[in-house]
């Protein structure tokens, strides 16, 4: 979905910076790609790029938790239970939203497995998004997607289904129509 959104933005004549974790996707050469591995790296790269941008489409799904300790070698079986301690990672969207200028916009994605709309609205409010795109886990690795786009009031602005390229063009058209016009 990220690549498809990049292509839709480029087709609209926009300059695009992509901050991407390790994926098996090739982004268009016209996009400026900043590769990252961790959520901390993603946040740092976004904090550097965001001030110079008109807006952000947060389609990535960075890890919400990371292990407190990473072993340098394989952990061998002991026959005993293994306890893994996790800490929350920084919330990239919420952190950037706190620094958002009045003329910048922010679009989040909410990949939810239950209570889709309720969880998306909660995320939209908590992260100060202007729009949020709701999709399900079936989108992962699939060439198809089915999304709802919600505005700040929680109203469904659009529902789109089909190949990811078509859905991305539809999502980007809504972003252009609703968020670019307010500049």
Image (tube, rainbow, N blue to C red):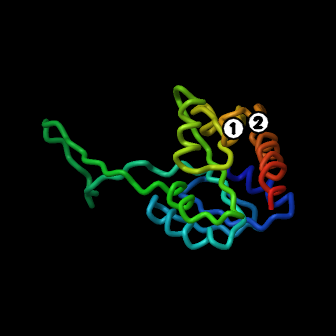
Task: Give me the residue at 46% from left, 58% from top.
Answer: 39
Pinpoint residue 93: horizontal percent, then vertical percent.
54, 55
Which residue is labeled 2 in the image?
Answer: 157
Pinpoint residue 34: horizontal percent, then vertical percent.
60, 68
Tell me the SS state at disc 1. strand
Task: Give me the residue at 59% from left, 60% from top.
Answer: 20
Pinpoint residue 109: horizontal percent, then vertical percent.
62, 44
Between 53 and 5, the one lying in front of the other is: 53
Task: Give me the residue at 62% from left, 49% from top.
Answer: 129
Quarter of the image where one finds residue 49: bottom right
Task: Return the mark for residue 18.
Answer: none
Establish if 57 lies above or below 146: below
Q: CA distance from mark 1 to mark 2?
A: 5 Å
Q: Number of callouts in the render?
A: 2
Which residue is labeled 1 in the image?
Answer: 150
Q: Are marks 1 and 2 in contact (CB under 8 Å)?
A: yes
């Amino acid at each position: 979905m990220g690549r498809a959104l990049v292509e839709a933005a480029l087709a609209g004549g926009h300059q695009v910076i992509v901050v991407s974790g390790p994926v098996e996707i090739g982004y268009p050469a016209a996009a400026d790609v900043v590769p990252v591995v961790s959520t901390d790296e993603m946040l740092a790269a976004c904090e550097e790029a965001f001030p110079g941008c008109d807006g952000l489409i947060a389609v990535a799904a960075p890890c919400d938790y990371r292990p407190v300790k990473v072993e340098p070698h394989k952990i061998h079986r002991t026959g005993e239970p293994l306890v893994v301690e996790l800490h929350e990672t920084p919330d990239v969207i919420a952190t950037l939203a706190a620094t958002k200028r009045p003329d910048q916009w922010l679009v989040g994605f909410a990949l939810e497995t239950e209570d889709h709309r309720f969880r998306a609205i909660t995320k939209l409010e908590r992260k100060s998004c202007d729009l949020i795109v709701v999709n399900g886990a079936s989108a992962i690795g699939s060439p198809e997607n089915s999304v709802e786009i919600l505005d700040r009031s929680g109203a469904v602005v659009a529902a789109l289904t089909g190949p990811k390229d078509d859905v991305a063009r539809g999502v980007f058209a809504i972003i252009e129509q609703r968020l670019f016009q307010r500049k």
